[in-house]
Amino acid sequence: MLRATGQNLACAGCVAYAAAACLNGQQIQATVDLAAPFAPLIARLLGPGVATCPVSSAVVPTTTNTGRGEWLFPTGAGRESDLLPPLPTARGKLILYLHGGAFVLCGAQTHRLISFEIVRRTGAVMLMPAYTRPPHCRYPTTLDECARIYCEVARRYSPENVIVMGDSAGGNLAVTTLLRACREGVPRPAGLVLMSPWVDLTEASLSAPSMVENERSDFIPRKLMRLFKEAYCDGASANGIDPADPLISPLYAEPAELAAALPRTLARRSSRSAARLDET
């Protein structure tokens, strides 16, 4: 059984999340520093320049049609003195950001370095859902929530005004959410942005050469990644669902299904993984 604890860390120039888990009686700790990888990524995605507008946030503490989470929007655009997000408009753009964190860690607080910067530079409205995570649930609960939220924002904003983004495990959820939506007949969004998406949750992926070679430099140790993977999708295995199922590991989706479900896509990965892929 997964036993994990986490704590946000605040320090100058650092956005980090410290996590610990007990695996076979051994305490494993990991500190995820999001500032270093996200800063150059923001520059590449959005280009250089000064922020175009200040940002306000509205936390959704109770369950609504769009779930719990945090809304970000340009200051002055919200309702009731910016305590509530703006209502959808015919031309309003929405970014649905599914945060990463190995399906278990992180949240809106740890990702504010990138979420605030994106809203400041684009002037778009962003929703970052606080989806339910292990150990409080197992597959397919998280995917069900994300798919339901996408369907709701697509209905409110119209799919052509929605961009879905995700990093790491959030990248997995971004792709699988759109695969699920396509199967249910929901139109795809205007665009998809993936940042180092974790798209292969099979056991073999954790023994891949790149995982072994880069273990010391990766944010999360392989043992902890395996524990988090099992916490997310072992329930699927118990129910006879193969971890290579495209709704768990979208790497194995048929090209035709991906072509039908995914819109124009921008995918970014680290220079280390890019070098490894070039070698293979």
Image (tube, rainbow, N blue to C red):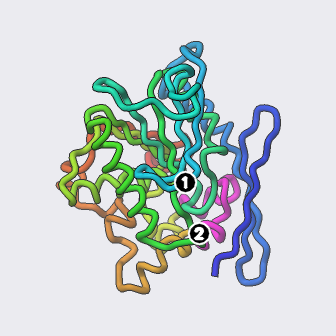
Q: Residue furthest front?
A: 80
Q: Element at badge 1?
A: loop
Q: Residue at point 62% right, 31% down?
A: 39
Report which quarter residue 27 is drawn in. Answer: bottom right
Which residue is at the front of the view, 7 or 73? 73
Q: Residue furthest right?
A: 11
48 over 212 or under it: above or below: above
24 over 134 or under it: above or below: below
Q: Where is residue 193? Give x, y as percent.
A: 40, 39
Discs 2/1, front: 1
Magenta-highlighted residues: 210-227
In the picture, measured across the screen, residue 241 lies left or right of residue 195, that is: left
Badge 2 crowding class, 10 Å Cα cut-off, few under 14, some 14 to 19, many 20 or more, is: many
Q: Residue at point 34% right, 36% down?
A: 162
- Alpha-carbon span between mark 2 and mark 1: 26 Å
Q: Which mark is residue 62?
A: 1
Which residue is at the front of the view, 50 or 159? 159
Q: Which residue is mark 2?
A: 228
Q: Element at badge 2?
A: helix
Asked if labels 1 and 2 touch by Cβ distance under 8 angstroms, the answer is: no
In the picture, measured across the screen, residue 276 lies left or right of residue 216, that is: left
